Amino acid sequence: MARKSEKVLAGPPTRRRRAAFFQSYVVVGSLLFAALAVTAHFIPYFPIDLAITRALQSHHDMITDRLLRATSWIGFEPQVEILGTSVVLLLFAFGLRWEAVGAVFAGLNPLVGNLIKLAVTRPRPSADLVHVVSRLDTTGFPSGHVLAVTSFGGYLVFLAYTLLQPSWYRTAGMVLLSLIVVLMGPSRIYLGHHWFSDVMGAYLFASVWLGLTIGFYRWGKPRFFRGPRTPQGGVSV
């Protein structure tokens, strides 16, 4: 297993340089999210929320409808828990133990998001304003679906980007995960489950959590798991 890992792992300097790129937006994202959360507590929705929802829902072609419904389906229970747990177990099975711990950390984001929902208490879109596919009883800000896929999927993109040598399967995996992250927000608006500002708040908070996850991963890797080794003699950090 170690020899196979050596063939696909990039050297430590490359991995550290790539990882630093992912953390540059944390400070700005934190400030913007805090401001948006406070505003959302007092304002049920903004004019731009209503305009964007109606614009998205005006497209009724079959491809758009199926694509956005399928994307949103991924974030519902129990499939989101099954997918997340499977990824963690696979990382452990391939010997990437600290990477698996980092994935668990990334997966805690929606739990924190639920606490924020309780504090903000913003209502979801109502059927008298936009089309609502199905009624959900929880509050709207921030979007739990977006929180989950952005932090967890973003962490997997980070792992692929920093650990794997360039290859078609590395590129394909990163593109697929990125598409899910990008489309999850519009899918929640399209179904009438969230406002645009709910979604943007979730992207902002998830980006901050992703930065924390990457920082946690890089802090703990050289301390707790020194391996696997690369052809250059370094260790994964």
Image: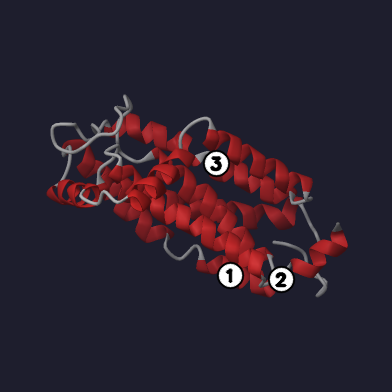
Mark 1 or 3, nearer chain start:
1
Count neighbours of disc 3 (C-alpha within 10 A) and say few if under 14, some if 14 to 19, many if 20 or more.
many
What residue does disc 3 label? 107
Task: Specify whether residue 202 is in view.
Answer: no
Mark on residue 157?
A: none
Tell me if residue 14 comes above or below residue 134 in the rendering. below
What residue does disc 1 label? 18
Identified by mark 1, the residue type is Arg
Tell me if residue 160 comes above or below residue 60 in the rendering. below
SS category of the residue bearing label 1: helix
Task: Specify whether residue 56 is in view.
Answer: yes
Tell me if residue 94 comes above or below residue 40 in the rendering. below
Q: Measured from the top left, where is residue 187 in percent x and y?
A: 35, 46
Mark 2 or 1, nearer chain start:
2
- Residue 43 vs residue 195: left or right? left
Count neighbours of disc 2 (C-alpha within 10 A) and say few if under 14, some if 14 to 19, many if 20 or more.
many
- Residue 233 vs residue 190: left or right? right
Q: Looking at the image, what colour scheme do you see?
A: secondary structure
C-alpha distance separating marks 1 and 3: 22 Å
Instruction: State if disc 1 and disc 2 touch (CB < 8 Å).
Output: yes
What residue does disc 2 label? 10
Identified by mark 2, the residue type is Ala
Identified by mark 3, the residue type is Gly
Q: Quadrant of residue 229?
A: bottom right
Q: Quadrant of residue 42?
A: top left
Mark 3 or 2, nearer chain start:
2
C-alpha distance separating marks 3 and 2: 25 Å
